[in-house]
Image: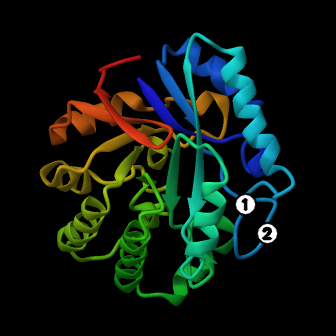
Amino acid sequence: MIDYHLHSKRCGHAVGEMRDYVTSAIEKGFDEIGFSDHLPLIHFYDPALTMSWDDFPFYIADVARMKDEFKEIEIRLGIEVDYIPGKEREIQSIIAEYDFDYVLGSVHFIDGWGFDDRRYIDNYDNYSIEDLYKRYFKEVADSAKTKLFDIIAHPDLIKKYGFRPNVELDDVYAKTIDVIKESGAAIEINSAGLRKPAKEIYPSQDFINICFTRGVPVVTGSDAHSPDDVGRDFDKLVESLKTAGYTDVATYVARERIMTELKDRA
């Protein structure tokens, strides 16, 4: 099995040494993992959200060190990049400087508000939840249109705290997924939502089902912020994928996609 969404303590909101994440994956029988810690934010700096730019080269070196130290597991160099409208050229320039195996694209901000940050949860009171969802999925679609990202991470993160609109979302999902399909990106199936108030995999089963019918490839990730989180709830994740009809998942080397069998267990 494969877990492409591992963080490290450098991001300011994760714990454990990088080596501990690798050994956890090995103990759980994983074939391949990828570190994809947060790229320092383009529009401001918050040490509780990302590493600093001074720290960033050390992150790259740390992953290389893990590759050299652990030969019994494939380790990929990834990065999670926030999509910030208007900053596309800066993001492209930064990504091009490094030999990433894959780049995750994420939407964590709407109008500068970190909607998945518990410190600012009260700001939900200032929005119509229905309008907020539509705005969020437009941002996700816009991130895919840039073609900067290999993978669209946790595509329905907006549900993290359990706020849900009283409307059907299939049309919104389908329009977003069609844009992702056109962009050539994969989507991440992320088990972290099960550990949050949403109590559901990112994205929902309905979203995954539409992705399958549209032929959008998938990547598996735990969004681990501690070594214990590596591969957590992957039994439920695999069940969701198989329910939709998936039999394979995407992996990446030097930003080239390689499809591999979806395994039942590590």
Circles 1 and 2, Cβ within 8 Å, touching? The answer is yes
> Real-space Cα distance between discs 1 and 2?
7 Å
Q: Residue at x 52, y 50 (%)?
A: 103
Query: Please, what is the three-letter code of the amino acid marked with disc 2?
Result: Tyr
Q: Is residue 10 above or below residue 18?
A: below
Q: Residue at x 20, y 67 (%)?
A: 174
Q: Residue at x 70, y 18 (%)?
A: 68
Is residue 66 toward the left or the right of residue 213 in the image?
right
Q: Nearer the viewer, residue 209 or 192?
A: 209
Q: How many marks?
A: 2
Could you say where residue 162 lies in the image, as x and y percent from the top left?
A: 44, 63
| Rendered-image quadrant of the N terminus | top left
Helix, strand or loop at mark 1: loop
Q: Which residue is mark 1?
A: 40
Residue 15 appears in the rendering: no
Is residue 178 toward the left or the right of residue 73 in the image?
left
Could you say where residue 178 lies in the image, as x and y percent from the top left?
A: 22, 66
Q: Nearer the viewer, residue 202 or 6?
A: 6
- Residue 45: mark in rendering: 2
| Rendered-image quadrant of the C terminus | top left
